[in-house]
Image (cartoon, rainbow, N blue to C red):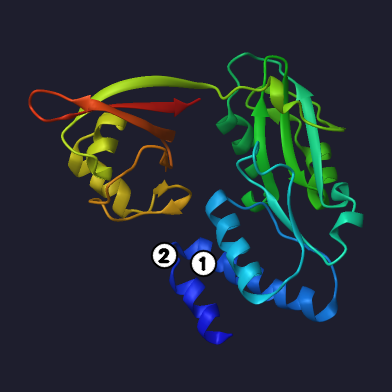
Amino acid sequence: MNEEYFKILNHINDVDTKQTIKKFIDSLFIVKEKNISYCSDFLTPNEINYCIKSIQTFSNINYEIIPNFEKCERNCILLGNNIEYLDKKEYISFIACGKTTEDVTHRDVLGSILALGVVRSKIGDILIDDKSIYIVVRKSISNYILANLNNIGRNNVEFKIVENIPYENIQDNYSEYSATVSSLRLDVLLSEILNLSRNKVSSVIKSGRVKVNHEELKKIHGELLPGDIISVRGFGRFKFLDIQGKTKKDKFRIKYIKYE
């Protein structure tokens, strides 16, 4: 067991991710030993994959990903031998409020929640459509959020519990861009995307402010692939969409998006 345990953990470079998976594996053994149910906090797609590998390695316990692995970016893993009888609403809640301004963003909502002292892992997806703001949260903090999240920026809001989120009506809010870059290295792409010098970008990366696919990356020379999601603290979140060919000077034509 120890060999497999450390094999999984040693494969993870990001410190926060490693700590999250260690906690999950430890909980997995408790669930197996005591025959109880357990629900993780919200996990990134990478963390979900590590957790599933851990379940397959160490136990045959049933699991379910909630609220929706296909439609949500952040999900919880629910463990239990009789998982089909568990009420998912005992673990997560959906809350919503009407929009009071057209330019409210994901960052505005998340910042307002974190300002209340709520840990990021207790918050799932934040989704915004034409009329409403929806947030998935752990049930344990839902009442606290309802009582204290009264403002987003300068706008007064009033959240309430809702039955579900209309995923089919929600579209990602982003802007799409084209660019020409000399290589697909992280520092080169970020220099173009952020409109910063390579030296400045290198400092941002080395300071730990950059995550690629939800894991911190400090190697400025790492090469990106189409589909990679890049988060830069203080600048926002981006997705490298695809390569559209090369110029006569052998530079890459790329497309990327910036999430609003």
Label whose residue precedes the other's in the sequence (2 or 1): 2
Residue 123 or residue 38, whichever sits in front: 38
The answer to whether marks 2 and 1 mark residues whose Cβ atoms lie closer than 8 Å is: yes
Residue at (87, 33) in percent of width and height: 163
- Can you identify the residue that label 2 sits on? 13
Total numbered badges shown on the rendered structure? 2
Quarter of the image with the N terminus in it? bottom right
60 above or below 104?
Answer: below
Left or right: 207 in relation to 83: left
Q: Quadrant of residue 12?
A: bottom left
Left or right: 46 in relation to 201: right
Callout 2: 10 Å neighbours few (<14), some, many (20+)?
few
**Disc 2 residue type (three-letter):** Asn
Q: Which mark is residue 10?
A: none
Badge 1 element: helix
Q: In the displayed image of the protein, which residue is found farthest to the bottom? A: 2
- Can you identify the residue that label 1 sits on? 18
Residue 206 or residue 253, whichever sits in front: 253
Residue at (61, 73) in percent of width and height: 57
**Disc 1 residue type (three-letter):** Lys
Q: Quadrant of residue 206?
A: bottom left
187 above or below 33?
Answer: above
Q: Quadrant of residue 254?
A: top left
Badge 2 element: loop
Q: CA distance from mark 2 to mark 1?
A: 7 Å
Residue 69, image x, y percentages: 66, 44
- Whether residue 89 is visible to the viewer of this picture, yes or no, is yes
124 above or below 40?
Answer: above
Residue at (73, 30) in percent of width and height: 134
Residue at (55, 86) in percent of width and height: 2
82 above or below 71?
Answer: below
- Whether residue 115 is visible to the viewer of this picture, yes or no, is no
